């Protein structure tokens, strides 16, 4: 979809299983230009190492968000207290001042890369190919039938932001903001080892409930997008419920420091089982 943002994400029953999966999928692939050639940690062994003294950061901007549900906020703060007890450390407030711009920034960069990357799916070399009376008609028919509504929306948005007269106004500025978002995290990680935050502003909505309002659905990414823009690993795990719906705690770590967020998640998980 978007080369500078795509990462493997997976589901697991618990943190131990997550560590096993990561051990299997991590590592350099000579045929994958976006994989990093770095030494790997032994994640299954690392998760059980003591986390006493782990420095915890709480981004104030995340908890000041107007749309954050009060019930979600309460449960996340309770989870933070629990992790403070486990580590023996007091969480300190940190600032990610450009986090407010991350969502808008992402929804410029991501569609632009989608538009560019999916241009190859023209019915000639890759994927679906719908025959028609001539080459142009075949091309249009293939792309019309091969892409769903959301994919088409992202292609159109991306094509617009990359078009003449808008590239500098939108895409180039979004890249600059992305750099600022990353710098915010770099500064924060001089003070802390992990950052704790909500995963979404509310619990989940009904299937298809917001399909007619994509902007509302995009807004649900507000807490997870900054880490993606900065190229940081993040873990989501359940930390409580509102009614019968789970609330997710997000643990963000430094670049290539998956072992630390897995360790924090592992010890927190032991307290809620």
Image (spheres, helix red, strand yellow):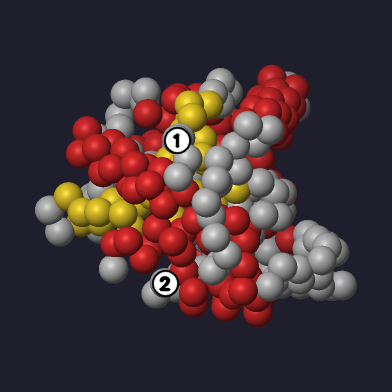
Residue at the spot 25% in from the left edge and 48% down from the top edge? 203
Q: According to the image, label 2 marks what residue?
A: 14
Badge 2 element: loop
Label 1, on which residue? 90
Q: Position of residue 63 (x, y in %)?
A: 37, 29
**Quadrant (top left/top right/bottom left/bottom right) for the C terminus:** bottom left
Give the side of residue 86 with respect to residue 202, left or right.
Answer: right
Of the numbered discs 2 and 1, the one sitting upstream in the chain is 2
What residue is drawn where x is 46% and y is 35%? Answer: 91
Q: Check the image and report above or below for 249 versus 146.
A: above
Q: Residue furthest left?
A: 243
Q: Which picture quadrant has residue 194?
A: top right
**Circle 2/circle 1 CB separation < 8 Å:** no
Q: Is residue 226 left or right of residue 237?
A: right
Q: Position of residue 94 (x, y in %)?
A: 53, 26
Q: Classify mark 1: residues with Cα within 10 Å, few (<14), some (14-19) or many (20+).
A: some
Q: Nearer the viewer, mark 2 or mark 1?
A: 1
Q: Residue 58, which numbered label?
A: none
Q: Name the residue nearer the viewer: 31 or 26.
A: 26
What kind of element bears circle 1? Answer: loop
Q: Is residue 220 above or below residue 236?
A: above
Q: Residue 250: x, y in percent?
A: 44, 48
Q: CA distance from mark 2 to mark 1?
A: 26 Å
Left or right side of 74 for 199: right
**Residue 55 placed where, x, y %?**
55, 40
Say which quarter of the image contains residue 230. top right
Q: Where the N terminus falls, by quadrant?
A: bottom right
Residue shown at 78% from the left, 63% from the top: 35
Position of residue 192 in the picture relative to residue 248 (left or right): right
């Amino acid at each position: 979809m978007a080369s500078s943002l795509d990462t493997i994400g997976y589901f697991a029953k618990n943190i131990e299983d997550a560590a096993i999966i990561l051990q299997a999928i991590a590592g350099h692939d000579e045929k994958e230009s976006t994989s990093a050639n770095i030494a790997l940690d032994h994640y299954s062994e690392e998760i059980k190492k003591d986390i006493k003294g782990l420095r915890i950061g709480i981004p104030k901007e995340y908890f000041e968000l107007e749309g954050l549900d009060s019930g979600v906020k309460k449960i996340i703060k309770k989870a933070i207290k629990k992790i403070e007890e486990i580590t023996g450390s007091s969480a300190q407030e940190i600032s990610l001042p450009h986090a407010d711009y991350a969502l808008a920034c992402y929804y410029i960069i991501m569609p632009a890369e989608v538009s560019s990357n999916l241009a190859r799916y023209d019915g000639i070399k890759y994927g679906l190919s719908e025959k028609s009376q001539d080459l142009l008609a075949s091309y249009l028919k293939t792309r019309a039938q091969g892409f769903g509504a959301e994919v088409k929306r992202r292609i159109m948005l991306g094509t617009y932001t990359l078009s003449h007269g808008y590239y500098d106004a939108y895409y180039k500025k979004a890249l600059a903001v992305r750099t600022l978002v990353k710098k915010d995290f770099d500064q924060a990680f001089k003070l802390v080892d992990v950052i704790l935050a909500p995963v979404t502003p509310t619990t989940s909505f009904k299937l298809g409930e917001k399909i007619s309002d994509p902007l509302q659905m995009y807004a649900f990414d507000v807490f997870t997008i900054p880490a993606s823009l900065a190229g940081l690993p993040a873990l989501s795990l359940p930390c409580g419920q509102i009614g019968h719906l789970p609330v997710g705690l997000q643990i963000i770590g430094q670049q290539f420091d998956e072992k630390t967020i897995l360790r924090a998640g592992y010890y927190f998980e032991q307290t809620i089982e």
